[in-house]
Amino acid sequence: MFRSTHILSGKTLYERPAQPMEEFEYELRRLQQRQHRFAALKVTERTALLHDFADRLAAGRSRLAVMICEEVGRCLRECEAELDKSVELIRYYAHLAPELLAHKTIATQAALSQVRFEPLGIVLAVMPWNYPVWQVLRFAVPALCAGNGCMVKPAPSVGRVTEALFELVGKDLPLDIAWLAEPDVRHAVARTDALAFTGSTAIGRRLAAQAGLYMKKTVLELGGSNAFIVMNDADLPQAAKDACYSRFRDAGQSCNAAKRIIVTEAVADEFIALFLEECAKLKTGDPMNPQTTLAPLHRRDLREKIHCQVLDALVNGAGVLCGGQIPECSEKGWFYPATVLDHVNHNCRVYHEEVFGPVAVILRALGEEHAVALANDTPFGLGASIYAKDTAKAWQFAAKLQTGAVYINRHTSSDLRLPFGGVKASGYGRELSEFGLYEFVNVKSYWQK
């Protein structure tokens, strides 16, 4: 069942059952036919259709942003930013794709030898709830540029905004929704040509195993527990401000947020005092209110999970510097306060697990080399930040970090022009940039005597 509810009132906003497999098969055959026609178009003809889609999405920005705010619970301005970045993404690839997908002639002994980039077919995407527009388009737009068709299984709690998004897609682009029940996803993996998944590491492992049975290409963007490293010579006020923003934006429900704040003992107390000052400025409330800076969590079970992680940390020797309690108030919504845990150690669950909510974990490092070792002591490897005035030294430390990205004197984020993805339990493959475009193509060699 796909069911969207209002984040504060709990009112049902949208509801529909999962589709029977017979219906899925029918829609898949139709999509395959559309994909064949679409792939036969020139790249510039495909990108022209994407430019038109970008215009429609820009025109629908305000309506979709409100829907995301109501269903997901993020602050309205954060939802508007998601839509703006999504429009920018479409236009970026529509502009760049003709150059990136051009045939590449390579000198060999042949009279003519080339590399061409051809579509794989239908890419199945199993998508999360936290960025219901951005996550879909981040995989779909480059795949469409290459001539693929895309079938998206949305998260059960964001069906309304997903349907609204696909109304803007139109019929010219081979991009469709798969209203699948969870047990039917395995069949869909077998029937399509590639898989994109964004979500938890546990589910990613299961889907990757299923795709492996059928030799399907996969790109997995999984969990993250990004280190935010504060070195001895860091600009502490700026680092504290950035750490607070990165940890608590989107109610802390982002894989790419700063989650483990690793600070050297030489500056730990000073930094923590500044960080707590920034946390105290956060305002909890209705995400539609422009004054709100800390929105509620998406679901009750998510709040219960992070609270259990906090309680476990306290039992195992960590201390709470702020927050750490479920609010006792009549206000509806799954609110949780900005929480900061200090003296977190190896026995605490939050040391090893991803914390998907507004909880900052502070790890005190004996020195800068120890800070890097702590950063790597995690199953995850999505991104990391290093704050230091000596940028040459920061680059040396960055090379030692086991992550897909390192940001120096900036919190982790994503840039359309740079590849996005991780290593270890954060998944494999890349999205965005030219590298994201090449993930779902057949890099095909031609040789003529």
Image: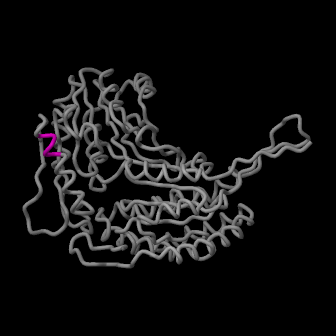
Residue 417 drawn at (x, y percent): 54, 47
- Judge whether residue 291 is colored magenta: no
Q: Nearer the viewer, residue 326 or 289?
A: 326
Seen in the image, is 183 located left or right of residue 433?
left
Seen in the image, is 97 located left or right of residue 176?
right
Relative vertical location of residue 405 with respect to residue 248 in this rendering, above or below: above
Residue 343 drawn at (x, y percent): 16, 32
Q: Nearer the viewer, residue 258 or 117?
A: 117
Instruction: Examine the image and state in which quarter residue 32 appears.
Output: bottom right
Residue 405 makes an appearance in the image: no
Residue 29 makes an appearance in the image: yes
Residue 447 drawn at (x, y percent): 85, 43
Q: Nearer the viewer, residue 67 or 378?
A: 378
Q: Residue at x 31, y 32 (%)?
A: 229
Majority secondary structure in the magenta region: helix
Q: Residue at x 41, y 22 (%)?
A: 393
Check the picture and name the quadrant holding the N terminus.
bottom left
Relative vertical location of residue 130 with respect to residue 362 in this rendering, above or below: below
- Judge whether residue 312 is colored magenta: yes
Instruction: Examine the image and state in which quarter residue 131 appears.
Output: bottom left
Q: Residue at x 56, y 60 (%)?
A: 190
User: Which color scheme is applied?
Assistant: one colour
Residue 82 drawn at (x, y percent): 41, 60
Relative vertical location of residue 257 with respect to residue 328 in this rendering, above or below: above
Q: What range is drawn magenta here? A: 310-314
Outermost residue to the left? 328
Check the picture and name the quadrant holding the C terminus.
top right
